[in-house]
Amino acid sequence: MDPEFAAVSDLIADIRSLPELQGVGDVDALMEQIRRQQAEVEGIQRSVEAMEITGASRHNEVQVTARGNGEVTDVSIDPDAIDQYNADELGECLKQAVNDALRRVREASAARFRPVIEAASRIEGL
């Protein structure tokens, strides 16, 4: 028998014997549900890493686009802002735009994961 297969089989047997799972019903169905949720989480993670979201400074002088993995993919500065602001003020606008983009990425990521987290909490409540 393959050692990795044996280790997984032993792990499954250990999980089935947990006192918390006694009387839970079909442990195989529960394990399958966990596998499906794991695959769903991996798919959501890939989609979150690929999404692109744009944030902006307070008055839209600077816009920054960031991916779900935190990589900044685009920075756009209003040409009028270059004439209107000094370097420190433009730096502040850039910081606002980056922080807004990253905040929006976190919010979008949390929204995409929320259904899976809620489903997992229902399993924990068994």
Image (cartoon, grey):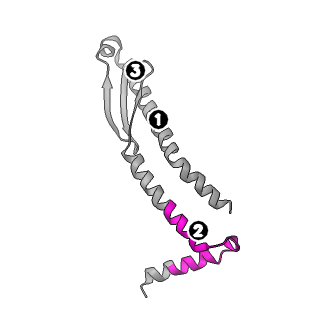
> Label 2 is placed on what type of residue?
Leu
Give the magenta part as a residue range: 9-37
The reply to whether dot 3 and dot 1 touch (C-beta < 8 Å) is: no
Q: Secondary structure at mark 2?
A: helix
What numbered label is drawn on residue 30? Answer: 2
| CA–CA distance in space, label 2 to label 1 | 34 Å
> Label 3 is placed on what type of residue?
Asn
| CA–CA distance in space, label 3 to label 1 | 15 Å
Q: Residue at x 55, y 76 (%)?
A: 12
Estimate the x, y position of residue 93 in percent, counting from the top left. 40, 22
Q: Residue at x 57, y 70 (%)?
A: 29
Question: How many numbered circles are shown?
Answer: 3
Q: Which residue is mark 3?
A: 60
Q: Earlier in the sequence, mark 2 or mark 3?
A: 2
Q: Secondary structure at mark 3?
A: loop
Estimate the x, y position of residue 32 in percent, counting from the top left. 53, 68
Report the mark closest to the observer, 2 or 3. Answer: 2
Report the mark closest to the observer, 2 or 1. Answer: 2
Estimate the x, y position of residue 13 in percent, counting from the top left. 58, 80
What numbered label is drawn on residue 104? Answer: 1
Q: Is residue 34 magenta?
A: yes
Q: Is residue 10 magenta?
A: yes
Q: Is residue 23 above or below residue 83?
A: below
| CA–CA distance in space, label 2 to label 3 | 49 Å
Which is more toward the observer, 36 or 53?
A: 36
Which is more toward the observer, 47 or 81?
A: 47
Q: Earlier in the sequence, mark 3 or mark 1?
A: 3
Residue 79, picture quadrant: top left
